[in-house]
Image (spheres, rainbow, N blue to C red):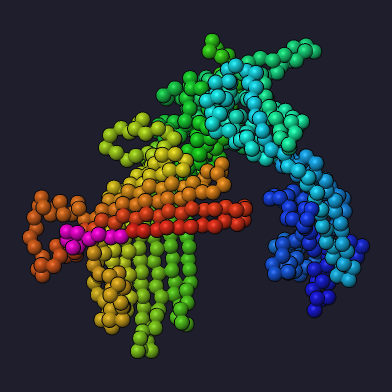
Amino acid sequence: MASLVSCHYTKHVPQDQRLLWDQDIREKDDKSAIKGAESILKQQPNQKILWSMPKVTIYNWGNGQDSSFFSRIGEAPVILDSIKTRKGAEQLQYYYFNRGYFGAKTDYKISLYEKKRWARVDYYVTPGARFYLDTIETEVRSPKLRGLVNHFSSETVLKKGDPYDADQLDRERSRLVEIFRNHGYYNFSKSYISYKADTTLGNYKVYLKLIIDKKPFRSGDTILYKEHEKYRFNEVYIEPDYDFKNQSKPGDSMEYMSYVLAYDTLEYKPRYLTDAVHFKEGDIYRQKDVRETYSHLVGYQAFQITEIKLKEGPRDTAGPTLNAIIHLYPLPKYTFNIQPELTTTNGYGGLNMSLGGTWRNVFGAGEALDLKFSGGFDYQATAGDDVASQAIEVGGELSISFPRFLLPFNSVGLLPKRMRPRSKISLSANRTTRFEFDRESFGGRLSYFWNETRLKTHNVDLYDVTFAKLYEINPTFEGNLSEFQQLSFQSEFITATRYSFTYNGQLDERKVNHQYFKGIFEMAGTSIRLGKALAPQGENTDGSFDLVAGVPYYQYIRPELDYRFYWNFTEKLSWANRGYTGFILPYGNSA
């Protein structure tokens, strides 16, 4: 059996070559290699599941050509390459060196299994002693940058006592570049930051010097240096109907709040476009403002392509300037979709159909209207009867999203642009008629959303209304339900106000472990109670519940807390812990 399997895996392996079945990296004294070492090897064996290679099996069902269906969905067998193996050993030595093992040595051994036509590679590492950071100094040769370096020095990723790690050094360079670019230094790059490491201190200690240099330039045959300069935005152009194929110049333009709108046909209100741009004429260049603009425009879901071009503008008395050109290619104004679905249950068939569409830029300010109709019927066996009963369900949903707060007053400047305020109104209706019950429901909601930061989001459902009317229920069906299940089959009227806050630390790439928190507070029925107090309608007939349109309304308070902590041991291995609590406190008409 093993021989047959072996032949199966090597079906498309040439006779004079071998399938790379496995490889391993071991340190001296048979210790495992340091984290990440295996990932740098250029050649990796095929993926295994319980000592089998299912993707190679699928690949071998085909003819071994990339055009074959099975070859495309499978995985070609990895053939041993001795040159890549030798280079892999060299890369391992560099990898260990960059982790502070300056005396590391590597070797390898290839084992051939002629009968199976397999090969195994074992890499051997003698790491030697590891070096650690002892003294860390920073030399800032550009005085204009010195204040920024000192101000953000507490955020450095380099700490005394940490192992020497080239990746950490590069992360420190990236951190500094990010700081400088977020404070106006548009063309600052990593090439201006270098390191000098001295390992002659003894006791495996490293003296590390970080050097931030001035900007070099050539004058004849001489290399000179000059100060880095801050850039300001000179003009910001927005082209909302840019055609990336024709790239013709816009036929018209206008100025709005220091922005220049260039267009052939302006289908958007200017504020909609400028609300998403987080920088303006006269602002100091900040890289994060450009990124937030990209994110804001993508969040609109109105444009297929977004491009921001930055070009050096004319120099003025304050220094160098930038011109920003924002190209936007809109999505189609209307999109439609139809989804038919055939169902079968216990031999009985059914048909469901949904028809939906999106209308973008409804009022010229980036609003998006979504409309969906759904309906269907099926047949189900009736208890105690050989005749099937018909079940019918129809419904519809209408929502409109606004890229701003929907308020009865002008909300320009109410929140910073980075918070991306949004609103949404939604309405829904549904009618379900079955042998067991007949029920219809209506819903409506007005919601507001905003981002405090990239990790923190807020949501307020100012008014969430649900009205459900149960017209009929089969006594036998109701009798088979538990007391808890019966609560789902009652007429009800709920008006709720809800606030939720979410912190998602998983979006922070700088941290290894992450936290997640979501808190919700909901209060229902207060507005109805207030309305009835202002305009009394008399008591209901049985004295148990006050009614609205013949349906009892509910009052309650519902807090809810959800906390999670993720320990990320490796890129593929995590341990998640979750704590959840919440309760419902009925009061008033529900007490």
What residue occupies the far front of the structure in this picture? Answer: 203
> At 25% across and 81% down in the image, what residue appears?
475
Question: Where does the image place residue 242, in percent across and percent down from the top left?
Answer: 54, 34
Image label count = 0
Q: Is residue 584 magenta?
A: yes
Q: Is residue 464 visible in the rendered structure shown here?
A: no
> At 71% across and 33% down in the image, what residue appears?
206
Residue 385 appears left or right of 345: left
Question: Where does the image place residue 298, in percent across and percent down from the top left?
Answer: 50, 41
Q: Is residue 283 above or below residue 432?
A: above
Residue 99 appears left or right of 435: right
Q: Is residue 324 magenta?
A: no
Nearer the observer, 250 or 329:
329
Nearer the observer, 453 or 266:
453
Question: Where does the image place residue 254, in percent across and percent down from the top left?
Answer: 45, 24
Magenta residues (range): 583-591
Question: Where does the image place residue 325, in percent across and percent down from the top left?
Answer: 55, 28
Nearer the observer, 356 or 129:
129
Residue 71 appears left or right of 393: right
Question: Dividing the image into 4 quarters, which one contains the N terminus?
Answer: bottom right
> At 35% across and 63% down in the image, what residue appears?
395
* Residue 111 image-quadrant placement: bottom right
